[in-house]
Amino acid sequence: MSTTTAVVVYGATGHTGRFVVAELRRRGLAAVVSGRDAARLEALAAEWGDVDVRPAAVDDPDALDRALAGAAAVINCAGPFAVTGGPVVEAALRAGIPYVDVAAEIEANAAMFADHAEAARRTGTPVVPAMAFYGGLGDLLVTAAMGEWTAADTVEVAYGLSGWHPTPGTRTAGEVSHRRRAGRRVRFADGALQYHDDQASERDWHFPEPLGRRAVVAEFTMADVVTVPSHLAVPDVRTHMTVEAARDLAGEDTPAPEAVDDLGRSDQTFVVDVLVRADGVERRATARGRDIYAITAPLAVEAVRRILAGRTRTTGLASAGAMFDAADFLRSLAPHLAVELPR
């Protein structure tokens, strides 16, 4: 297999990584599977039969360079991204190939913008962090809702999940983030990330029908508080989560996702509802779909496909909404995603 048009999936044996490899293959794109566990990678290759295997640990720069050599792009699916993000993006910059990751960790995404934007700009290498359900999808919806607006007063993103069975990787990443912020909560207000000890509170959110009014945990902060302000002038970005999903995530005994169809998706459904307000005017954008981990695969793979085709609005390090035509990108995800955007 020629690797000149292949996409390296780092963390390919993980739950989301497997969805990403499958999506690449579904679209006819060659995949190189990489990560630290050579035995699991070989088992994955034996299962699919048409993927190249290149093991590499994140603390081995030479191995990472070999894994990315000659490839067209890399998608990093290996959390916690506080550990993997820096080494893998640095390897991509050395190789001069686009980097996309699916990080939901707030601090890891903030560090990506702070630590690697200059190198990506200098080399002209596209780098898109948080190209996933959390961070990327919300940013695309907000950008599409903004339309011609260049600024807004507030952005709210409400996640209407039917439930949330976290993967082991999600739990590990959450533990890392919890330690990094010393157990404090985080919000984006007055134009900056703020850490605080306030107790979580609940409120009602009026999702579009048929979901309707649901109780949400207010300021259940996700990666949108990094991606949205990275390119839009919005001083206040808040995200909320349905109470049922928040309780599932917090439950120590909540099991991992269980596949219920041939694509490996769980029965989880979601609605992501965005409200943007400016000068008393409100705009709304909504996306509906199934399985937050599975939907990450078409998001990340479509991002790579557009980058390789030159269908980008900027270069260097940028969030999804800054890098792509947000409305066109969202509509291209049908039938994986159903979207309602302002006319």
Image (tube, rainbow, N blue to C red):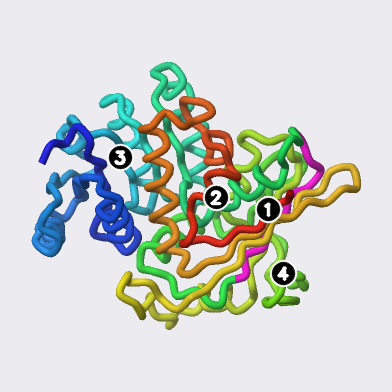
The type of residue carrying mark 2 is Leu
Q: CA distance from mark 4 to mark 2?
A: 18 Å
Extreme residue in the bottom direction: 253
Q: Residue at x 77, y 71 (%)?
A: 203
Residue where numbered disc 2 is placed? 330
- Name the foreground residue: 55 vs 143: 143
Residue where numbered disc 3 is placed? 74
- Would you identify the image quadrant in which residue 40 lies? bottom left
The type of residue carrying mark 4 is Pro
1 or 4: mark nearer the eye: 1
- Would you identify the image quadrant in which residue 66 lies? top left
Residue where numbered disc 4 is placed? 208
Describe the element under mark 1 as helix, strand or loop: loop
Q: Is residue 159 magenta?
A: yes
Q: Quadrant of the N terminus?
A: top left
Q: Residue at x 23, y 35 (%)?
A: 5
Q: Which residues are magenta?
A: 151-160
Task: Compare marks 4 and 3 and give the one earlier in the sequence.
Answer: 3
Callout 2–callout 1 Cβ contact below 8 Å: yes
- Name the foreground residue: 325 vs 39: 325
